[in-house]
């Protein structure tokens, strides 16, 4: 049942009844006054006319409570459409949108296209227009080219193979994302007289609603692409010095300590297998800790166990927590690169615990630390720091910014866990640094890339 058509039919019936009853009551009033001057019948007739006028006003002049109900209904329709189109213009999503939109119009059928083929159709004769049917309606091509709504009558558009050939008129509205026409929404009617300003306004409104939601979907998809790109950028950062130094260390141990060399070689292969993998999925905190300790083992083999000391204080309850990959190793790498002194040993403590609705992972060292100026610009990329800073040293180095890795980690943490999550750095020059990774709530999943429209 189409509630819009029922309401329109009810209004038409009431108008006809009112048009018949009012003249009859007026005639009856005149007849009664001529036949019998008694005022009682005249009063009754006038009262009937007044009641009819009030009823007419109630039906056609909508009161506030009905306006409120209409607003709630509009919001509900928008919410239902969003539940489908939030995944893009897939056949399933567009079919769901068609089923919701059609009952809100006087149209007999509806179809959504990507400009080349039908994505979904619903209504009378929709079985003859399955998904994938090529679009033969000339009006659709014009709308795709112009980006503006068009009303057509079948007599003026005689393309063979047009959808719903028995429906003689229709409205085609564009679905646009960033001023680019991505598809069309078509409403089909039995006759041109069924199309009025309200129907064109509905077609335009629903098309704009879907377009807005498709734009939101595209932005979300771009965020996911950015997260994947950032992860690949971090994975591709293979430090050649680390690579050569580690191979040299293992080679020097082959004769003096074969078992240690063998163990380091296994750690080295596992470390790079994980680093160079194309994983874009969330991992567990336990897996991140294992990867971090492989890196530490390789560094201890290079610098010596007495010079690089590491201890862990991990709450077993957080080991299964899901986290973005490659968030711990960059923090450990920064400790060794920037905190280790020339002679004195460096101690690193890795801890993790759950606090209320968040998980906190802390990497703390007793190394060289940072001054306030360096700490203030810590999350600037190195290139940006070099361009904006006048603090360049004689050797060409710059203390501001920590390069791509730390910025990448922060951005991906915020992408997966939201703005309340992040990295908090505390440091004092000569005393050490404490980096706290705060992960609030549950992470979002990277959904498989979905098409905005069928190709």
Image: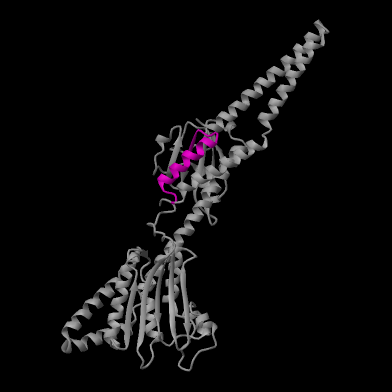
Name which residue lies at 27% across and 72% down: 273
Q: Which residue is at the front of the view, 193 or 404? A: 404
Image vertical order of residue 234 relative to residue 53, above or below? below
Quadrant location of residue 341? bottom left
In the rendered image, the vertical position of residue 426 relative to residue 54, given as above or below: below
Bounds of the magenta segment: 87-111
| Residue depicted at 68% across the width and 18% down the height | 20
Q: Horizontal placement of 449 versus 293: left or right?
A: right
Decide: is 45 above or below 105: above
Q: How is the image coloured?
A: one colour
Q: Is residue 97 magenta?
A: yes
Query: What is the x, y in percent for residue 411?
Result: 45, 69
> How many numbered discs, if any?
0
Q: Is residue 24 visible?
A: yes
Farthest top residue in view: 35
Residue 387: x and y in percent read 52, 82
């Amino acid at each position: 049942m189409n509630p819009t058509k029922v309401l329109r039919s009810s209004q038409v019936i009431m108008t006809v009844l009112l048009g018949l009853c009012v003249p009859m009551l007026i005639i009856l009033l005149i007849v009664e006054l001529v036949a019998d001057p008694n005022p009682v019948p005249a009063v009754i007739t006038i009262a009937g006319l007044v009641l009819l006028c009030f009823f007419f006003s109630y039906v056609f002049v909508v009161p506030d409570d009905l306006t409120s109900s209409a607003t709630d209904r509009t919001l509900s329709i928008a919410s239902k459409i969003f539940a489908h189109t939030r995944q893009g213009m897939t056949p399933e999503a567009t079919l769901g949108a068609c089923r919701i939109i059609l009952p809100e119009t006087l149209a007999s059928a509806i179809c959504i296209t990507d400009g080349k083929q039908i994505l979904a159709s619903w209504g009378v004769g929709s079985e003859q227009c399955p998904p994938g049917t090529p679009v033969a309606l000339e009006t659709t091509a014009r709308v795709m080219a112009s980006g503006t709504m068009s009303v057509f009558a079948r007599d003026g558009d005689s393309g063979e193979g047009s959808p719903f050939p028995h429906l003689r008129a229709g409205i085609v509205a564009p679905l646009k994302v960033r001023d680019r026409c991505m598809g069309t929404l078509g409403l089909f009617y039995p006759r041109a007289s069924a199309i009025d300003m309200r129907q064109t306004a509905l077609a335009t409104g629903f098309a704009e609603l879907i377009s807005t939601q498709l734009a939101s979907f595209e932005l979300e998809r771009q965020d996911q692409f950015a997260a994947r790109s950032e992860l690949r950028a971090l994975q591709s950062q293979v430090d050649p010095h680390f690579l050569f130094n580690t191979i040299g260390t293992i080679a020097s141990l082959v004769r003096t300590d074969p078992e240690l060399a063998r163990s380091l070689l296994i750690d080295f292969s596992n470390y790079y297998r994980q680093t160079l993998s194309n994983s874009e999925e969330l991992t567990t905190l336990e897996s991140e800790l294992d990867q971090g300790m492989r890196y530490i083992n390789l560094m201890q083999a290079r610098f010596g166990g007495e010079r690089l000391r590491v201890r862990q204080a991990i709450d077993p309850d957080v080991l299964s927590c899901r986290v973005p990959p490659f968030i711990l190793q960059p923090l450990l790498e920064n400790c060794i690169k920037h905190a280790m002194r020339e002679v004195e040993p460096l101690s690193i403590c890795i801890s993790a615990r759950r606090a209320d609705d968040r998980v906190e992972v802390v990497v703390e060292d007793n190394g060289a630390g940072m001054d306030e100026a360096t700490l203030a610009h810590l999350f600037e990329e190195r290139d940006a720091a070099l361009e904006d800073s006048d603090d360049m040293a004689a050797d060409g180095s710059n203390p501001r910014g920590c390069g791509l890795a730390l910025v990448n980690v922060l951005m991906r943490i915020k992408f997966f866990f939201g703005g309340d999550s992040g990295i908090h750095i505390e440091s004092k020059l000569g005393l050490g640094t404490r980096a706290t990774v705060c992960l609030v709530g549950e992470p979002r999943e990277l959904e498989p890339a979905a098409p905005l429209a069928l190709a």
